Amino acid sequence: MSLREQLIEHVKTRYRTEPEYPWMRWPGYAVFRHADNGKWFALVMDIPRGKLGAEGGGIVDVLNVKLPDPLLADMLIRQPGFFRGYHIARGSWVSILLDGTVPFDEICRWLGESFLATASREKKQRLRPPKEWIIPANPKYYDVQAAFAREEEIDWKQGAGIRRGDTVFLYVAAPVSAVLYRCLVTETDIPYRYDDGRVRMKALMRIRLLKRYPPDRFTFEVLGRDHGIFAVRGPRGIPASLSEALK
């Protein structure tokens, strides 16, 4: 089986996408696109090797993919088997030789990057790696310390962008004013409607307690002085320095 055939089978299996052959003039050109937004994430072509500026003659199979960063594309085209995107030179498209110059595993890696780079916002959210968040817990509205004294897993107001598999660090507001808990999000989008004029909830997430922190370790003062966090009013990502410290 040729690299081209292996790649097409990989796309069918991994991304559940069938190739499209939209051009009668170029019957060997196969397009792969997202079902939801219609954007291409890969284009397989058979072209004269010289069109790429590659050494040698004859026809060669290539894969066009879009990378998330133009600087990354500029770096890759300096390596053997990578070229500026043929027929899609704008942006950060690159062409990868399918002749064995680039290992198949590496080709699949950049195909995956292209799939993410061209995905819809909703799909990117589903496919992104797990993320770490810091979220507020106000004792005036809910006694989270008492809740975790009773249970290892509780329901919590779901923050925008948070999904299952993410990590949340609960910052308990005054009079505690410190991060007390590290939790794993085990479930999201639990239907719930609540509005008392002060707190409004449209959905809940379930969080499981993983670790407790002493109340004098990650205080409000430490968050601001060492990690640049001067307010925790809603879910937010955390800087790398705080992530390392919390581990």
Image: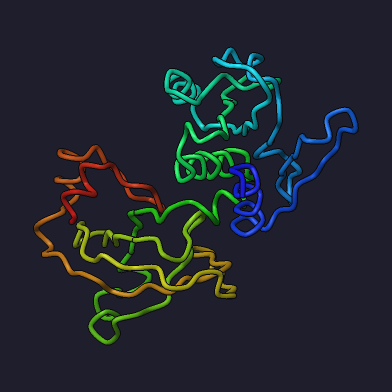
At which x and y percent is residue 62? 63, 31
Q: Residue furthest right?
A: 24
In the foreground, 137 or 87: 87
At which x and y percent is residue 29? 76, 34
At which x and y percent is residue 183? 30, 68
In the foreground, 127 or 245: 127
At which x and y percent is residue 46? 71, 30
Q: Is residue 91 above or below residue 44?
A: above
In the foreground, 159 or 47: 47
Q: Residue at x 64, y 28 (%)?
A: 60
Q: Quadrant of residue 117?
A: top right
Q: Is residue 205 above or below residue 85?
A: below
Q: Residue at x 68, y 36 (%)?
A: 44
Q: Quadrant of residue 27?
A: top right
Q: Is residue 59 above or below residue 31?
A: above
Quarter occupied by the C terminus: bottom left
Q: Residue furthest bottom?
A: 150
In the foreground, 231 or 9: 9
